[in-house]
Amino acid sequence: PHDRPLTTVVLRHLPCGIEVAEVCSILDQLGLRGLYDAVLTTHSGDARMSPGVVTVNFLRSVDADTCVRLLHGRRFSFMQPPCMAVLAQCQGSDFVAACMAAYTHAADIAERGFACLRSS
């Protein structure tokens, strides 16, 4: 059980190779602009290719819930399974701190697909 708001969402089955900017664009188009502060795409093998798993931290739990409601089950490609949107195990500031600790400088962050941002 969490004693803090649940604000971090994991999105699975997004298009492989999706970049942070593309994820932000999707979120913004769904009306979530300004409601999240961090996005992390993970890479497997080739550092430029995301395996379709993205983690997003929202500022409020209600916005994380909205993201789950809007994206869970949504198809981004006929050939892919529907998006799976779930609350993450690592939440909120713990998620952001863990991500920042994993990267040593801006080039490393950009190469690995992490963007800590204020969406506006």
Image (cartoon, helix red, strand yellow):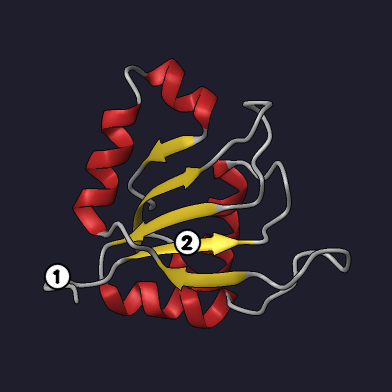
Q: What element carries label 2?
A: strand
- What residue sits 87% from the left and 69% below the top? 78
Q: Are marks 2 and 1 in contact (CB under 8 Å)?
A: no
Residue 101, horizontal then vertical, whole percent: 26, 30
Amino acid, disc 2: Val
Residue 88, horizontal then vertical, whole percent: 38, 63
Q: In which quarter of the image is residue 5?
A: bottom left
Numbered label attached to residue 70: none
Q: Which residue lies furthest to the front in this view?
A: 1
Q: Residue furthest right?
A: 79
Measured in 3D between alpha carbons, the distance from the residue under mark 2 to the one under mark 1, in whole angstroms, is: 17 Å
Q: Residue furthest bottom?
A: 69
77 left or right of 29? right
For the residue pair 25 and 51, the one nearer the viewer reads as 51
16 left or right of 67? right
Q: Quadrant of residue 106?
A: top left
Vertically, is 2 above or below 13? Answer: below
Numbered label attached to residue 4: 1
Residue 56, horizontal then vertical, whole percent: 42, 56
Count of numbered circles in the view: 2
- What residue sits 43% from the left and 26% below the top? 109
Vertically, is 83 above or below 19? Answer: below
7 left or right of 69? left
Task: Assess disc 1: are there few (<14), some (14-19) or many (≥20) residues with their C-alpha within 10 Å of its C-alpha.
Answer: few
Task: Assess disc 2: are there few (<14), some (14-19) or many (≥20) residues with their C-alpha within 10 Å of its C-alpha.
Answer: many
User: Mark 2 highlights which residue?
Assistant: 10
Q: Is mark 1 on a helix, strand or loop?
A: loop
Vertically, is 42 above or below 6? Answer: above
